[in-house]
Image (cartoon, rainbow, N blue to C red):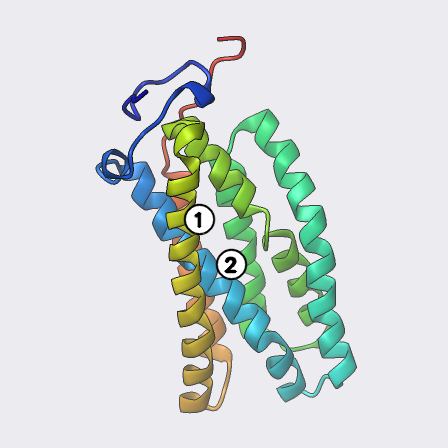
Amino acid sequence: MSAGPAAAGGLATMRRTSVREAARTRPFWLVMVAFFICGYGDVFFTTHLVPFAVEAGIPDMAAAGALGLMGGFSFLGVLVAGAASDRVGRKNPLAALYFFRALALAALALSSGELTVYLAAAVVGLTFISPGPLASALLADRYGALSVGALYGLAILSHQIGGALGAYLGGLIFDTTGSYYWSFVSAALLTLIAAGAAFSIRELRPRPGS
């Protein structure tokens, strides 16, 4: 059974959109861009947070503790994002997650204090896993749940390519400049673009009871 992405309404599970059809639409590419940048920020942060903190004079165990704090807050982020998604839709919470992640990354460009590192780790943790359920639900609403496997798989591929670049370029910028400042600035600016991309997505949600 096939239906184009413009067929709003009805249960998402009753619709399927091919990758070729989805690739002709703007929302598909907005999700790809957002997830590419999401991967850039995720892997950049997890790869370079501890070296950044140690370079700033924070003890090794405290720096590792910040990374652990991020992992703990990632669980809470999924719960909060899921509840928000059920009430206000998918794209606005997704855009908000990226916006607050951008603020956290920008804060680390401006301050390398231990408190800033811990607060930024907590905020990034809230935004670490939570974009995934929001994006997959958004794709299901927009293109049909039968299409999510292929479309979300491509989003994850985009995410992983962005992640590889985030890990590599973060280190390259540090090696070139001797500082993580521009690494965090670039990651923050890119994440603001991800927030704009998510906010620009036109949602199609199934009508209750249809």
State the mark number for residue 195: 1
Q: Secondary structure at mark 1?
A: helix
Q: CA distance from mark 1 to mark 2?
A: 9 Å
Which residue is located at x 51 percent, y 81 percent? 180
On the question of residue 203 being in view, the answer is: no
Q: Secondary structure at mark 2?
A: helix
Position in image of residue 69 (x %, y %): 74, 63
Between 2 and 175, the one lying in front of the other is 2
Which residue is located at x 52 percent, y 29 percent? 89
Of the residues under marks 1 and 2, which one precedes in the sequence?
Answer: 2
| Quadrant assignment, res 159 | bottom left
- List the residue tagged with mark 2: 102
Q: Is residue 50 above or below residue 41?
A: below
Image-based side of 78 in relation to 182, left or right: right
Q: Is residue 42 above or below residue 172?
A: above
Position in image of residue 176 (x %, y %): 40, 90
Q: Is residue 176 above or below residue 115?
A: below
Position in image of residue 135 (x %, y %): 48, 41
On the question of residue 18 being in view, the answer is: yes
